[in-house]
Image: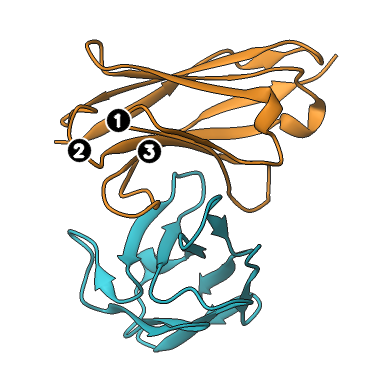
Amino acid sequence: QVTLRESGPALMQPSQTLTLTCSFSGFSLLTSGVGVGWVRQPPGKALEWLALIYSDDDKRYNPSLENRLTITKDTSSNLVVLTISNLQPVDTGTYYCGRRIVGDYVDVWGKGTTVSVSS
Amino acid sequence: EVLLTQSPGPLSVSPGERITLSCRASHHIASALAWYQQRPGQAPRLLIYYASIRATGIPTRFSGGGSGTEFTLTISSLQSEDSAVYYCQEYNDWPPLFGGGTKVEIK
């Protein structure tokens, strides 16, 4: 069974750096073509792709936030970590990680972790 | 950058009805389109990928169609658990983009 679970702090202050961890099971990031991505959703709003890391360590970032995002993987521990620097209140929302297997869509989602950015 | 426009606006429909949701892309995206269902307070769930392929475990009352710039998600015989927001997402290019969603309420 494929599962993913996000973890991270619930409350952050502006200008801080957020570190989110996605722990997964039921698949391997060593499998060709597989990836793990991050999608966020501000309260009451639509979804937005942030970043994706592939099995070959190729990384993609949303250009609208590219200079603030870093995605890494630890295949031995089945973890993917996303950092977002210089947080602002507009970064408040729910952050999801998910698996990518064929195209850049998510076939299995984590439950999400909620982050609030406020002074 | 591709823009995705979803229609209609919020729907309030009765159980057993059939509805068709639309997703229009500003540029040709072949069949690189997915549909997701997001129930209140839950994560999205993949329904359809490559425009018309039903994801594992998705009931047959959900069907997708279209290619190029016009796509549809049809839900036949709506059930109470279908109350949700439905998003389309294109993955023809990076970054993948989501539509704004269509909210479906079951009366």
Residue matched to label 1:
A56
Q: State the CA–CA distance, disc 3 to disc 1.
A: 17 Å
- Frontmost of labels 3 and 1 is 1
| Count of marks overlaid on the render | 3
Q: Position of residue B83 (x, y in %)?
A: 46, 66
Of mark 2 and mark 1, the one earlier in the sequence is 2
Residue matched to label 3:
A98
Question: At x 20% / y 38%, what residue is drawn?
Answer: A32
Q: Colour of chain A?
A: orange
- Front residue of B15/A47: it is A47
In the rendered view, does B53 fall on the left or right side of A45?
left
Density class for disc 1 (Cα within 10 Å; few <14, some 14-19, many ≥20) is: few
Q: Are marks 2 and 1 in contact (CB under 8 Å)?
A: yes
Question: At x 42% / y 60%, what residue is drawn?
Answer: B36
Query: Compared to B16, does B47 lie above or below?
Result: above
| SS category of the residue bearing label 3 | strand
Q: Position of residue A38 (x, y in %)?
A: 49, 35
Name the chain letter of the residue that bears numbered label 2: A
Q: Is residue A111 visible?
A: no
Q: Position of residue A24 (x, y in %)?
A: 28, 25
Name the chain letter of the residue that bears numbered label 3: A
Residue at the extreme right of the image, as rendered: A119
Q: Colour of chain B?
A: cyan
Inspect the image, locate mark 2, and give the three-letter code of the amino acid beneath it. Ser
